[in-house]
Amino acid sequence: MEGTIQQAKGNQVVFKTKDGLPVSLDVSSIKGLPALSPNARATLFYEQGAQPAPGAGNTFTAEALKRESTSR
């Protein structure tokens, strides 16, 4: 899923989809997570049909988060 990083703090990231939907993510399980900054374009990979972990509110666990290059 493509979108932009809205906020990144520790293991928590707010990702905004191309459709404008904000998604809260737990990125603690991602090894080698790139530096994330607000408004950076990124592609989110997650398990389809996944539900937030019990007690995690509306936070989903990201499988991978790839920051897109800004150069063209």
Image (spheres, rainbow, N blue to C red):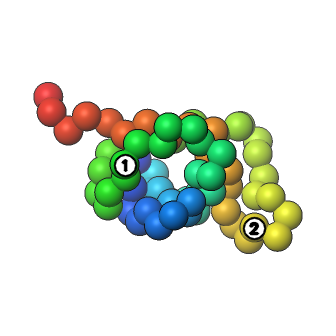
Where residue 18 appears, as percent x and y from the top left, is 40, 48
From this viewpoint, is residue 1 visible?
Answer: no
Looking at the rendered structure, the secondary structure element under dot 2 is loop
Please state which of residues 23 and 10 is positioned toward the viewer in this rendering.
10
Please state which of residues 69 and 49 is positioned toward the viewer in this rendering.
69
Looking at the rendered structure, the secondary structure element under dot 1 is loop
Residue type indicated by callout 1:
Ala
From this viewpoint, is residue 32 visible?
Answer: yes
Where residue 50 appears, as percent x and y from the top left, is 76, 45
If you read the primary sequence from the N terminus, does the residue marked by circle 2 or circle 1 appear first?
Answer: 1
Please state which of residues 19 and 68 is positioned toward the viewer in this rendering.
68
Circle on res. 47: none
Q: Mark 2 and 1 residues: CB-CB less than 8 Å, in contact? A: no
Which residue shows up at 41% across the image and 42% down it? Answer: 34
Q: Residues within 10 Å of mark 2 (few under 14, many from 20)?
A: few
35 versus 58 height, above or below: above
Residue at the extreme front of the image, as rendered? 32
67 versus 60 height, above or below: above
Q: Is residue 66 left or right of residue 50?
A: left
Which residue shows up at 59% across the image and 42% down it? Answer: 30
Where residue 31 appears, as percent x and y from the top left, is 57, 38
**Which residue does the numbered mark 2 point to in the structure image?**
56
Q: Is residue 22 left or right of residue 26?
A: left
Image quadrant in which you'd find residue 45: top right
**Which residue does the numbered mark 1 point to in the structure image?**
35
Residue type indicated by callout 2:
Ala
